[in-house]
Amino acid sequence: MRPCFFIRWGKQMKDKIKNVNSLEDLQSLYTETFGKNGTMTQKLKNMANLSNEERAVVNTENTELRQLFKEKQAELELAVLNSKLATEYVDVTLDTEPKNRGTIHPVTQSFKEAIAIFESMGYTLMTGPEIEDDWHNFTALNTPEYHPARDMQDSFFLENGNVMRTQTSAIQIRAMEKLGAPIKIFALGNCYRKELDATHSAMFDQLEGLCIDTVEKNINLSDLLGTMRVFASKFFGKEVDLRIRPSYFPFTEPSIEIDMKWGDKWLELLCGGMVHPNVLRNCGIDPDKYQGFAFGFGWDRLVMLKYGLNDIRAFTDSDIRWLKNSGF
């Protein structure tokens, strides 16, 4: 009799499941059946008191009811989805909600452009530490202790005698010490000096280049000027007029500054010259066998010029509105 009872109960439960019309009612019926105090849960707990035949019937009903619940749930969920699809729609003609998108900082963007330009001319990018020792930042660049040229830079010195890099020329020294000559490299990165106004920043960016080869190649200032013509035309997207002025730097001889015509004004583009023989000697390179030029940009000023900015401090004041509205 008892197996027949289990079978009748199972048939009744299957009919109830089939007649459920909502997910809420199905969940309620599932709890009544398989919950902590559910009907089937109690039957399973009482399995030890059942005969083998009764156990087989209970196990069969347990498996079939669980499967039927899953099928009914899938059926009801599909019905809900179809109902939504029939009544809800998206108007694709409406404008999407505005989203905040990140922008590439103009200095970073311009660095990428510069890297592509110089690499296309055969230069290799080099990097170096921002905290330098006296040798690489000053002495090896023909600026020994007490040399008056040190007064040209107001530096941040550390307690151990090191200095926050005042110029990326230190990377040139490290490159020549490591690679020797011939060498054709460029370097870019942060530099630090005690300066802060609309056109000067205590932390600023520089880009420098170095080209050294045998004296037979006769690398000279004409090569430097030609390199700058190519760079300027590619970076600014147009041909620019350049002019040369004599200058002084302890690490080049002769030393020059190159200006470019921007509108109706002449603006400083870079400084450079032929690498001083003492600098080559300091790096273990024989100046009787090798010669070449070096150049350096105050990079932030070039970026200001390209994008029409008038205050260098905007690069580092962390005002997101400036980037959003600048169109970079």
Image (cartoon, rainbow, N blue to C red):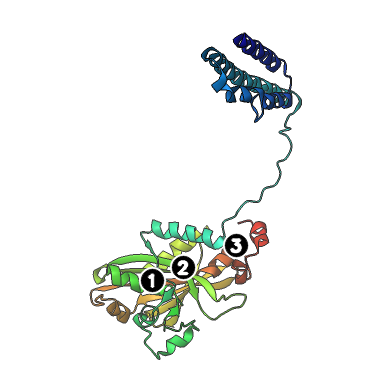
* Residue pictured at 48% horizontal, 58% vertical: 112
Write down the residue under mark 1. Answer: 171
Label 1 sits on a secondary structure element that is helix
- Which of these two is toward me, 194 or 219? 194
Asked whether disc 1 touches disc 3, contact meaning CB atoms under 8 Å apart, the reply is: no
Q: Is residue 13 left or right of residue 245?
A: right
User: In front: mark 3 or mark 2?
Assistant: 2
Above or below 318: residue 31? above
Ranked by sequence position, the earlier of labels 1 and 3 is: 1
- Which of these two is toward me, 125 or 218? 125
Write down the residue under mark 3. Answer: 307
Asked whether disc 2 touches disc 1, contact meaning CB atoms under 8 Å apart, the reply is: yes
Q: Amino acid at mark 1?
A: Ile
* Residue pictured at 56% horizontal, 56% vertical: 104
Write down the residue under mark 2. Answer: 189
Q: Amino acid at mark 2?
A: Gly
Instruction: Give me the C-alpha separation between circle 2 and circle 1.
Output: 10 Å
User: In front: mark 1 or mark 3?
Assistant: 1
* Residue pictured at 40% horizontal, 74% vertical: 169
